[in-house]
């Protein structure tokens, strides 16, 4: 596979690439064309195809919860693993790392200490802030989440979070959805990105929402056992 990307003229050392440009058996170099642009050339061995979670519009997520460990696997619709996310449930505040199958970080999520809204800030692989997701509880609409950056809300998330059926909306337009269309297991869910949205924000938001469900279920179970 060969790809060519034209980048506005910069010194080669100043050019940054998304994570899906890297992988085993992949070669990359930079050339300058006759128009003064830098050309990025990527070559991959035909014997190996590198699938990035960040390129997928439809994928599945499965959660695995152990006593003190929270794990999520991301797969394509054929069941091929694309990436995973891990967190230690004992760690305060909680932090998730999303890594591809070559152990390269795609993004990470950092929880906020003592936040009543379960705030998480989403970061890219180079530490750039993508947004902060918060939970909103309103009397008329029930539970919702929203994502904001620089104090401005730009994404609304609503639906049935317990049943893993919810929508992502930007400026009144649906851009993604979590659903159970392709899955049969209780702890699996499908994710479809249908509009113009940063895949990392969708992925991070789904992890946060599912994490909150896990922690609140554990809390409810502990309270019930304590009363007994």
Image (cartoon, rainbow, N blue to C red):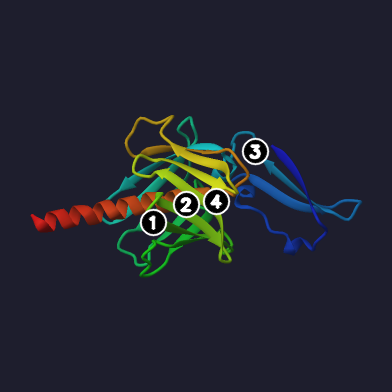
- Rendered-image quadrant of the N terminus: top right
Give the farthest residue toward the right. 34
Q: Nearer the viewer, mark 4 or mark 3?
A: 4
Q: How would you rate the neighbour count of disc 1 (Cα within 10 Å): few for under 14, some for 14-19, many for 20 or more? A: few
Q: Disc 4 on helix, strand or loop?
A: helix
User: Distance between the Cα atoms at labels 1 and 4?
Assistant: 24 Å
In the rendering, at what x and y percent does residue 186 appear? Answer: 32, 36
Q: Earlier in the sequence, mark 3 or mark 1?
A: 3
Counting labels gives: 4
Q: Kindly identify which numbered label has been placed on residue 45.
A: 3
Provide the residue designation for mark 1.
Answer: 137
Q: Is residue 123 visible?
A: no
Residue to which mark 2 is pinned: 205
Q: Where residue 54 sits in the image (x, y, percent)?
A: 57, 45
Q: Nearer the viewer, mark 4 or mark 2?
A: 2
Q: Residue at x 42, y 43 (%)?
A: 159
- Of the residues tagged 2 and 3, which is closer to the observer? 2
Residue beneath the point at 54% across and 43% down: 53
User: Mark 3 or mark 4, which is nearer the start of the sequence?
Assistant: 3
Q: Are marks 2 and 1 in contact (CB under 8 Å)?
A: no
Give the alpha-carbon distance from disc 2 to disc 1, as whole Å. Answer: 17 Å
State which tag comes first along the sequence, 2 or 1.
1
Instruction: Tell which tag, 1 or 4, sits nearer the viewer.
Output: 1
Frontmost residue, 167 versus 57: 167
The answer to whether residue 187 is above or below residue 222 is above
Whole-percent x and y of residue 6?
Answer: 79, 49
């Amino acid at each position: 596979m060969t790809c060519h990307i034209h980048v506005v003229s910069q010194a080669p050392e100043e050019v940054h690439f998304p994570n899906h440009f890297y992988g085993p058996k992949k070669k990359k170099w930079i050339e300058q064309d006759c128009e003064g642009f830098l050309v990025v050339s990527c070559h991959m061995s035909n014997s190996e195809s590198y699938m990035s979670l960040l390129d997928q519009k439809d994928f599945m997520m499965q959660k695995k919860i152990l006593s003190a460990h929270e794990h999520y696997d991301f797969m394509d619709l054929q069941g091929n693993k694309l990436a995973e996310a891990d967190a230690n449930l004992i760690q305060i505040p909680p932090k998730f790392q999303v890594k591809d199958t070559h152990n390269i970080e795609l993004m990470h999520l950092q929880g906020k200490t003592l936040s009543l809204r379960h705030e998480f800030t989403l970061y890219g692989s180079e530490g750039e802030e993508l947004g902060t997701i918060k939970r909103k509880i309103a009397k008329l609409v029930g539970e919702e989440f929203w994502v904001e950056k620089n104090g401005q809300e730009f994404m609304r998330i609503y639906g049935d979070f317990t049943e893993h059926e919810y929508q992502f909306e930007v400026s009144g337009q649906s851009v993604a959805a979590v659903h159970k269309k392709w899955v049969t297991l209780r702890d699996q869910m499908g994710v479809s990105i249908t509009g113009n949205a940063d895949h990392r924000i969708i992925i991070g938001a789904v992890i946060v929402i599912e994490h909150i469900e896990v922690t609140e279920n554990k809390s409810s179970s502990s309270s019930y056992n304590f009363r007994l």
